[in-house]
Amino acid sequence: MSSTMKGLLLKPNTDVNDTYMRKLLKQKYKEQQFLVNYPSVGINMSCSTWSKVIRCHQQEPNGFSNSPTPIKKQNLPPQAILTPVSDPTSIAKKRVYNFGKGKSEGNKGMKSLLGGKGANLAEMASIGLSVPPGLTISTEACQEYQIAKKLPQGLWEEILDGLKAVEKNMGAFLGDPSKPLLLSVRSGAAISMPGMMDTVLNLGLNDEVVAGLAAKSGERFAYDSYRRFLDMFGDVVMGISHSLFAEKLEKLKDVKGVKLDTELTASDLKQLVEQYKNVYIEAKGEKFPSDPKRQLELAVKAVFDSWDSPRAIKYRSINQITGLKGTAVNIQCMVFGNMGNTSGTGVLFTRNPSTGEKKLYGEFLVNAQGEDVVAGIRTPQDLDTMKKCMPEAYRELVENCEILEKHYKDMMDIEFTVQENRLWMLQCRAGKRTGKGAVKIAVDMVNEGLVDKRTAIMRVEPQHLDQLLHPQFENPSAYKDKVIAKGLPASPGAAVGQVVFSAEDAEAWHAQGKSAILVRTETSPEDVGGMHAAAGILTARGGMTSHAAVVARGWGKCCVSGCADIRVNELEKVLIIGDKVIHEGDWLSLNGSTGEVILGKQPLSPPALTGDLEIFMSWADKIRRIKVP
């Protein structure tokens, strides 16, 4: 057993042990900051791990040295402490970068310029995966926009030139009813901020284009895409509350006697489109902007503006993300998961982000678009649904996952769409994971020969180790008669607290030293502050790959999502489960590992240490220069 592990196991319940572990965590933060602040040094020098004092050693052929070399601290501007990124020499003044299958102007090393999403889209396209063609507007352009509060001179012309290349590639054109090209416009910073900035899908639709699309691909699909665009564009770009559109949709479903959006007919959706257009006039006093190029210009500005939205600022503050230039904008040819039962959309992780198990972990929705999954609008099914419905696309997806893991040497988070049985890759990034998942993935990838031990150690963040110190339920079998509902185990761990129904209340209760369980029908990015303040999160809708679940896992926050048995009345501040009514302030316990919702305040016990953690800490012992007594 490693000496570090002995220190952990001697007195697992004492303050001494807790203080000791936090010293290790604090040391890891310092080392990460050092590596960011001195990237050139980091190439030729290695830093001691898990030691009390940072001492760097010039690297000998065997990787070790007995002679410490002090480094004089420089006065550098603050930089992000998460996932340091570096660019190759960039082309002067170039602000728009095209990508498409087999050819790209960017690569995965250009995250600070193209954002994580743009850099990885370029990389996936370069290695031959099926990526819809598009272009990325750089973070430097966003920085210029933030200063001038308008598009930088010449940028719009560069965007249109990049768009021409996409149109030529696709043989379709923005605003052309006979050969319609629809676009997605998405954000993408150098460091992943799931759901915190804005996205617009199906851009380019108007009354003329939708008629052309209907003639080409069917009325129901065309008008479903149009109503989605009107809703999203109104919310993201025009500042019209999404609830105004949602009310119209729910009323129409009630009138038609259906429960699901997919049960509405083409005629129903045409009626809904007209109602949505009226929402613009009622809410803004102006008509929906029908010119596709005007739509594109407004969408680009909206994505740039979302960099400074309250939720994005709060997320960066919580996660100590500083020193970034802004967000890139990714403009990409739309592919459609809502073209019927041979189409769909999904999100997956190449390994289980909660446990680290080497098995695909994800969700899929037939006849849907990506926002339905990640925004938690609908509760999706597991990947077996895709395997049964679209076996060829599923096999290709599995192959792509293997390719990407070997290429990036990390667990990946992937978004994809199937359009009429053809698979398209929409995004990949290093997946957020829990502490338990991080340690297991690190150990397994060393054993598989994907990474070395030093890389594996640096992949496990200080907060990951902190999560492993979180308590679990003392005796899960003892509370079985108190289980009142079961949802999806979106983020593991145990949480005990008093029920609140808004993010603002969760923050206020936390400030008073109270433990709160945030209960929502579905979370939105605006809830980020309350999610962080709460001890646990419970939602009636949404899956295990929704933004709420991804963010919760990244923080090691217990989360149960998609709990269909609960009804949340946020106005009256009550939670109804069967014949039970739970009011604000009542105690509730959540088991994020099983999805159980438990009545009352259940007792907790200290966490158990796993074999993977012992192995991991023994590697840290061998690599560090100075032993911790």
Image (cartoon, rainbow, N blue to C red):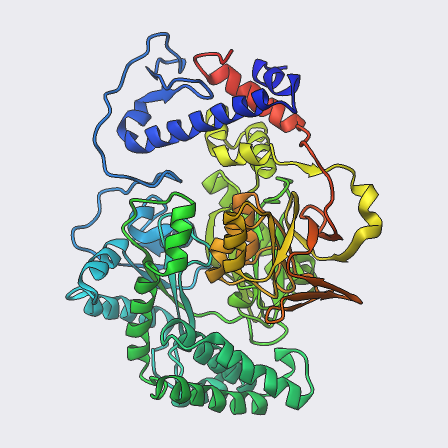
Q: Position of residue 601 (x, y in %)?
A: 72, 47
Residue at 44 percent across and 28 percent down: it is: 26
Q: Residue furthest top?
A: 66
Tell me: 498 left or right of 145: right
Residue at 42 percent across and 64 percent down: it is: 132
Q: Nearer the viewer, residue 614 or 537?
A: 537
Q: Position of residue 371 (x, y in %)?
A: 51, 66
Q: Does 514 appear above or below 520?
A: above
Q: Quadrant of residue 121?
A: bottom left
Q: Total number of numbered labels?
A: 0
Q: Does 275 appear above or below 379?
A: below
Q: Position of residue 380 (x, y in %)?
A: 64, 64
Q: Position of residue 31 (x, y in %)?
A: 38, 27
Q: Nearer the viewer, residue 524 or 154?
A: 524
Q: Nearer the viewer, residue 330 or 471?
A: 471
Answer yes or no: is residue 120 visible. Answer: no
